[in-house]
Amino acid sequence: MVHLQPLTLALALTVSLLGGPGTAQPAPAPTPAPTPAPSPLPQGDQPVRLDPADFTTRVDNPYLPLPVGGRWNYLTVGPDGDIRTEVTVAGGPTVAGVATVAARALTTDAGGGVIKDLTGWYAQDSAGNVWLLGESARDYVDGALTGVDGWRAGAEGAQPGVAMAARPVAGQRWRIGHSRGRFEDSARVLGVGGQVSVAAGAYRDVVEIEQTSPLSRGVRLHRFYAPQVGLVRSETGAADRTDLVAFRRP
């Protein structure tokens, strides 16, 4: 076993479901975190070798469940209209020898036009950690494809990372993935046991994680994960917030 203004915030929903902070305005200084807890999880560009036999496509980590057929709907309210993101889970490809599930996040503007189509590939190890093994992204403007990007563990030096620890502890850190110059995101657990209310419901025992990247210096994206649901809120501040509005189990 071993990317925020309302629009860019909506596009960032997914890697850790499913992506990094991206380009954005600097957020206020972060809340001081507890002393980091020891972590066997990968850091920085540390190479890891995964044993495919240690992984499953049954991703049932309480804080990041990804059942095939699951569906999450998110809303970002912005000055130019609402931005919506729908996340769905299906069978995924084999990446670096590991079978995965594919979590696809489709983001649309107020008129229903596609802005971004982003898919991340996930698997869970025997300890309960959810790993991210890569992603594929397509960007659109006025219905026209404007960019294609992505990374895959094992290709061009890219390394897999952890989307959610099996048992997150305040102060714990890990890398979410590493593809030099493309994706270099890291996570830090700010707190465990919080409460968050969104349109989809009121949740307790919420884990708050701060996501940062040296490719977007000064940007700190805070994500809130509820037990048995997953990501329920993503924000860089009260004015830049994306909330879960509906969740459907398969």
Image (spheres, rainbow, N blue to C red):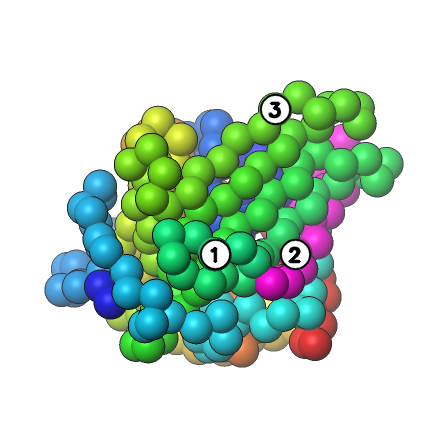
Q: Which mark is residue 94?
A: 1
Q: At x 34% / y 50%, what residue is drawn? A: 160
Which label's residue is closer to the chain start, 3 or 2? Answer: 2
Question: For the residue marked with disc 1, what is the amino acid?
Answer: Thr
Q: At x 52% / y 50%, what residue is drawn? A: 120
Give the Cα distance between marks 3 and 2: 20 Å
Instruction: Name the quadrant containing residue 136.
Output: top right
Q: Which mark is residue 203?
A: none
Q: Nearer the viewer, mark 1 or mark 3?
A: 1
Question: For the residue marked with disc 3, what is the amino acid?
Answer: Gly
Query: What are the residue bounds of the magenta stretch?
Result: 76-91
Label 1: state its secondary structure: strand
* Res 45 visible: yes
Q: Kindly identify which residue carries mark 3.
A: 147
Q: Kindly identify which residue carries mark 2.
A: 87
Looking at this view, is 1 or 70 the one in front? 1
